[in-house]
């Protein structure tokens, strides 16, 4: 009897082991299967200067195939913010793709004062490379000032460089920075008299035939026409009056109203450059992005590819006409159609359910302060000339010279350490004295010192935002913030760059392969995008990542 029990026990153990082994093998197969379900293509879309409320404000005017498709069938992060300032294009694109903020990736502005070399630098410029596709200097660009890797870099590394990355934008920085250090190509729009798409010798020595053919065609020339509204202007009820004093004019125009006769004032406004400040610029970008899909075989093999698209015209239009203009409304209605066209192409080229898209912005924007003032809302304009005069008087009175300040830019003061040492002063004392002076000025709301940024760890509010934008080696000694509603800008058009919520609150939509349907009002931040994508793709996080995956987004 005992012998029989022992035999049964052995059989049970063997069966148990066999079942367990089979289950493990089955589980392993599931994991392999899941890894094999990675999207064939990731499409990153950055809409330059897109406030979150452009989604909701124009919702009833949108069609079903663009923004609404992404919201209704994808995931909507409704409380999404930049966690740093300055909120501008270069830092925005770098932060989206690095999963970090300027304190780590080093792109602290579009332009900034290089305190080591004592000169102003541009975020993407690089004299070591030449323009490809033009005789101008517009292609002397590279990502060399970005200190960390991007999600596009990590995908390239993960696939042993087999997965392609191509970036497209009207603005050079909107293509160079998202493409990362390892992009196969980054293309941007030269404008001017050529209307060509160009690149840098950082990526290649000669334009591909398909790009040369696109440039030789009339694909851009067809947009040399008056800018009229897509729908009857009487239906544009989510924006202010067409004729007002809050909008800028093109050279030669006598009114800010539709239609805008582009051909009539073509040469006066830089020829093809004039298209940048119209909704047509986004259509040109979509045309070229689709041509990229058609010719580069993106999403056609087992290695995930990446197409980075930045829509720049939304920013140009916002700067010129303001966030409450008919022009902005028309621009977003036309962009909605361009998005629908892009998604439809992805369905047919890559396959529905075979690609993943995210859409966000590089910053928001403020209502035109002169408009806010007329609505009895506190707002205004910094008198930069008066501030500079008062500040110089303070420096002369306090220190006997203005030489200890080398530069004031991006709402930061850069001090000359040598002068301070020669005057036998402590740097932190000088920073604090200057901060107290700036704090006394009427239009300035808050001031912080580099010493505070160095010593403290802020977790919320304006100082948290400033600290994430403050790079120890590149940023200034004193940081000042204007009062809410105040800007340093002309009295027509909107701008951005501050740490205020109208510049930080932007959309974030995920759609497609690997993405849940739904939404959240929990706070998410720009650096969370790259690690979310990395988690979905199973690749390493970019090497400067400070964000965290948004777990609610992923299946």
Image (cartoon, rainbow, N blue to C red):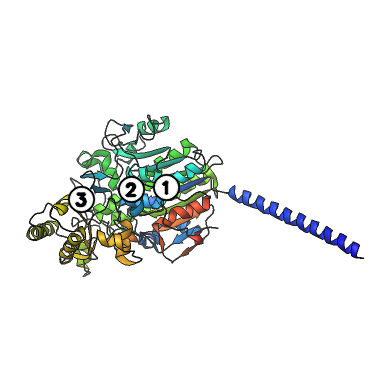
Q: Which residue lies at the image location 41% right of the left edge and 31% below the top edge? A: 208
Towards the viewer: 39 or 114:
114
Q: Earlier in the sequence, mark 2 or mark 3?
A: 3
- Check the image and name the residue furthest to the bottom: 376
Q: Earlier in the sequence, mark 2 or mark 1?
A: 1
Label annotation for residue 150: 1
Mark 3 vs mark 1, CA separation in Å: 38 Å
Q: Secondary structure at mark 2?
A: loop
Q: Where does the image place residue 374, in percent across and percent down from the top left?
A: 20, 66
Q: Which residue lies at the image location 49% right of the left edge and 49% below the top edge? A: 540
Label annotation for residue 226: none
Q: Which residue is mark 3?
A: 249
Q: Where does the image place residue 169, in percent across and percent down from the top left?
A: 36, 44
The answer to whether residue 47 is seen in the rendering is: no
Q: Where does the image place residue 143, in percent across and percent down from the top left?
A: 35, 42
- Check the image and name the residue furthest to the right: 1
469 vs 388, left or right, is: right
Mark 2 vs mark 1, CA separation in Å: 20 Å
21 in relation to 166, above or below: below
The answer to whether residue 242 is seen in the rendering is: yes
Q: Where does the image place residue 439, in percent across and percent down from the top left?
A: 18, 66
């Amino acid at each position: 009897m005992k012998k029989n029990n022992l035999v049964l026990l052995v059989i049970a153990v063997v069966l148990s082991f066999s079942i367990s082994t089979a289950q493990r093998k089955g589980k392993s197969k599931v994991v392999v299967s899941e890894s094999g379900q990675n999207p064939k293509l990731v499409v990153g879309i950055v809409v330059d200067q897109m406030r979150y409320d452009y989604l909701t404000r124009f919702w009833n005017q949108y069609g079903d195939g663009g923004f609404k498709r992404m919201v209704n069938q994808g995931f909507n992060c409704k409380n999404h913010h930049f966690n740093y300032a300055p909120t501008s294009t270069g830092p925005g694109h770098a932060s989206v793709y690095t999963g970090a903020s300027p304190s780590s990736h080093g792109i602290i502005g579009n332009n900034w004062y290089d305190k080591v070399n004592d000169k102003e630098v541009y975020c993407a410029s690089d004299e070591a490379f030449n323009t490809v596709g033009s005789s101008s200097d517009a292609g002397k660009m590279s990502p060399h000032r970005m200190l960390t890797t991007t999600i596009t870099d990590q995908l390239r590394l993960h696939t042993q460089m087999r997965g392609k990355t191509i970036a497209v934008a009207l603005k050079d920085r909107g293509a160079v920075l998202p493409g990362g250090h390892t992009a196969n190509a980054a293309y941007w729009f030269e404008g001017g008299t050529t209307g060509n798409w160009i690149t840098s010798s950082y990526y290649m020595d000669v334009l591909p035939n398909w790009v040369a053919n696109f440039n030789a065609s009339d694909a851009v020339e067809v947009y040399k026409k008056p800018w009229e509204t897509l729908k009857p202007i009487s239906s544009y009820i989510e924006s202010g009056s067409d004729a007002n004093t809050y909008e800028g004019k093109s050279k030669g125009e006598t009114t800010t109203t539709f239609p805008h006769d582009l051909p009539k004032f073509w040469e006066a406004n830089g020829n093809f450059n004039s298209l940048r400040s119209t909704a047509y610029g986004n259509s040109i970008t979509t045309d070229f992005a689709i041509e990229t899909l058609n010719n580069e075989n993106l999403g056609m093999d087992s290695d995930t590819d990446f197409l980075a698209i930045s829509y720049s015209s939304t920013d140009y239009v916002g700067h010129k006409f303001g966030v409450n203009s008919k022009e902005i409304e028309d621009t977003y209605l036309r962009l909605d159609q361009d998005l629908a066209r892009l998604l439809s192409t992805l369905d047919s080229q890559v396959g529905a359910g075979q690609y993943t898209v995210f859409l966000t912005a590089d910053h928001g924007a403020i209502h035109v302060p002169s408009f806010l003032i007329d609505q009895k809302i506190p707002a205004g304009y910094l008198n930069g000339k008066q501030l500079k005069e008062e500040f110089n008087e303070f420096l002369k009175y306090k220190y006997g010279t203005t030489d200890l300040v080398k530069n004031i830019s991006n709402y930061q003061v850069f001090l000359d350490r040598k002068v301070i040492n020669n005057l036998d002063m402590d740097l932190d004392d000088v920073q604090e004295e200057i901060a107290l002076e700036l704090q006394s000025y009427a239009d300035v709301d808050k001031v912080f010192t580099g010493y505070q940024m160095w010593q403290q760890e802020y977790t919320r509010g304006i100082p948290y935002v400033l600290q994430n934008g403050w790079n120890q080696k590149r940023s200034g000694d004193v940081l000042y913030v204007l009062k809410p509603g105040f800007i340093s800008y002309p009295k027509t058009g909107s701008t951005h760059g501050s740490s205020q919520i109208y510049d930080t609150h932007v959309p974030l939509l995920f759609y497609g392969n690997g993405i849940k349907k739904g939404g959240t009002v929990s706070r998410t931040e720009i650096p969370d995008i790259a690690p979310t994508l990395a988690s979905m793709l199973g690749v390493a996080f970019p090497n400067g990542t400070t964000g965290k995956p948004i777990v609610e987004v992923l299946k």
